[in-house]
Amino acid sequence: MWGSLRNRPWLKAIVSIFRLNLPFQTIIEFRMKEFTKQEYKNIFVEAFALGSDVDVTSLEYQAIPEWDSVGHMNLIGEIEDSFDIMMDIDDVIDFSSFTKGIELLEKYEVSLSE
């Protein structure tokens, strides 16, 4: 009926709230996950074991030796764990740069502030 809740984190949150009989305003709290762009940058630094002097904002897939297919899956795992999301396989494949990642995270209700 509802399809996969995994692809709709906002719907999963609403269903959970109604099961717990929480007030409607709680739904708003679950709607958007707020993080900083620095937290996102730190994921790249940690996933690829980079120095703090590396500009991760310009990174693209296979632009550095660490971002190979294995490093890519490590990065995706770190992102999923850090932001508490599960990315679709199409998005995992499409995650080709730091900038593209920000765009894809919006699909999962993850907002990155300065």
Image (cartoon, rainbow, N blue to C red):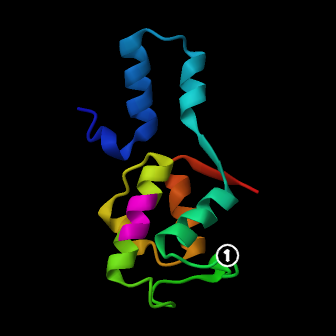
Identify the residue at horizontal 34%, vertical 58% (top origin).
88
Whole-percent x, y for residue 100 in the image: 55, 72
Dot 1: element:
loop
Q: Is residue 14 one of those drawn in magenta?
A: no
Of residues 98 and 67, the one drawn nearer to the viewer in this rendering? 67
Does 105 appear above or below 35? below
Quadrant housing residue 57: bottom right
First to last magenta residue range:
74-78
Task: Note whether 18 is above or below 10 in the view shown.
Answer: above
The answer to whether any part of residue 108 appears in the image is: no
- What is the quadrant of residue 87 in the picture? bottom left
Q: Amino acid at mark 1?
A: Ser
Task: Name the residue beneath numbered marker 1.
Answer: 52
Q: Residues within 10 Å of mark 1 (few under 14, many from 20)?
A: few
Q: Residue at x 42, y 39 (%)?
A: 9
Residue visible at 60% across and 64% down? 42
Residue 97 placement (x, y as % from top left): 53, 77
